[in-house]
Amino acid sequence: MTLFDVPGWSVPDEPVRVKPKKRKRTSKQNFDKVQSATVTLERLMEQLAASPAAETTRSDPKEEKSGGVSADGDRPAKKRRRVKKNKSQQSPTPTAIQEDGTHEASRKKRKKDKRKESSGEKVTGTPSPLKSRPPPEPRSTLTSLQHGMKQSLDGARFRWINEKLYKSDSAHAHAMMREDPAVFDDYHKGFRRQVESWPSNPVSHYISALSSYPPRTVIADLGCGDAALARALIPKGYTVMSFDLVADHSFVVDADIFDRLPLPGSEPDGDEVKNPGQGHAQVVNVVVCALSLMGTNWPNCIREAWRILRPNGELKIAEVASRFTNVQQFQSFVESFGFKHKSTDDSNTHFKIFEFEKTSRKPRGEKDWNKLLTRGDMLKPCEYKRR
Ligand code: SAH
């Protein structure tokens, strides 16, 4: 089972839904739940890390040998009791996790799977998250139990942030990141984990495609994430300007790409002499939007891409395949901003990769713009599927 409606887009420690009907909540309730679970777990983990029991568990060679957590994810009863004792000493307790169904549900499923395995029955569905779980980070002082809890927490938090980014206006997302930049870091930690499980990555495709462009090519990477394009292409002599919701004070410039990009360029005004209908003063040859059309107001990013692109510049868009209800309609929609569709690569099961070229366009009134800019529903959000 995948996290989104996309093969490969999954978080290994995805909680398993036990009773789907009873657990249906509103989006707001879900956000509150995850937030509350986050706070509760973080506190618990801090306390566990500081507790003598955690120390004992870490230094117990027998447990280290068996990996701390057994293959089916159940701790030995003795250890479980020890943690319970700790729980009773602490407030708040991790009940939020169990209310949310995450730990309890995955534990039950793992137990069930183990029973099936021992009876020779084929285990179907998601492989045990513990089996595919990467080893703890080398400098981590967490016990295996804490590490497992942290992974569940990270996965839930990633899904929560991801949902926020897809289902809200970019101003809201930008404010959320500004208030707490840790949200951005947590999102990207989760995103990197996703990328590791994909057979290919649009950014790698763009790095190799753009490496054969003329050396003076100026590229704007809108929604750049870790700025992988800039890191790979700047050393080769390309100019890459990378924008995302939070700056990293080296490669990434803070900007809401669906609002106004801090780059020169104008809309057409009818006064263009050399390139009629293409605006003035642009410096960018290629705009890349790799999986970044996330907020509900993403169409304004297409308008901004047109504004900053030099005459006949290129717009490259990669998006998750399952977001499209009608690819043809999407292409025509982008064209209506003043682009010519050049190609669509849908050979990849995960992504669709589009190429557009900037063309001339007539000045347009705000009423016409409003019709276009409110069509964010043309791309579906990447939905987290509860199991
Ligand atoms: N392009 C990168 C990152 C993809 S993840 C890659 O392919 O590796 C999507 C990125 O878009 C995230 O980093 C997210 O923060 C960014 N993003 C989404 N909405 C944005 C907005 N309104 N303004 C700037 N960046 C945005």
Image (spheres, helix red, strand yellow):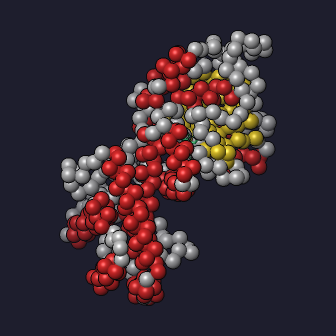
Quarter occupied by residue 45: bottom left
Q: Tell me residue 122's x, y (percent).
A: 24, 61
- Whether residue 331 is visible here, answered yes or no, is no
Residue sitting at x 69%, y 36%: 262
How many numbered markers are drawn? 0
One can see residue 46 in this view: yes
Please give the name of the residue rendered at 33% of the width and 77% of the height, measured from the top-left corner.
87
Please tell me in which quarter of the rendered image ligand 1 is found.
Answer: top right
Q: Is residue 382 left or right of residue 125?
A: right
On screen, residue 104 above or below 157:
below
Please say if 272 is above or below 7: above
Question: Which quadrant would residue 286 be assigned to in this image?
Answer: top right
In the rendered image, residue 140, in percent from the top left (x then y), is placed at 53, 74
Q: Position of residue 252 (x, y in %)?
A: 67, 48
Which of the pair 218/304 is nearer the observer? 304
Q: How far across and down, in percent of the image, does residue 8 sit?
A: 43, 49
Instruction: State whether residue 281 is above or below residue 291.
Output: above
238 or 227, which is in the foreground?
Answer: 227
- 327 on left or right of 91: right
The residue located at (48%, 37%) in the rendering is: 169
**Residue depicted at 38% across the width and 43% down the height:** 383
Viewer-nearest residue: 134 or 42? 42
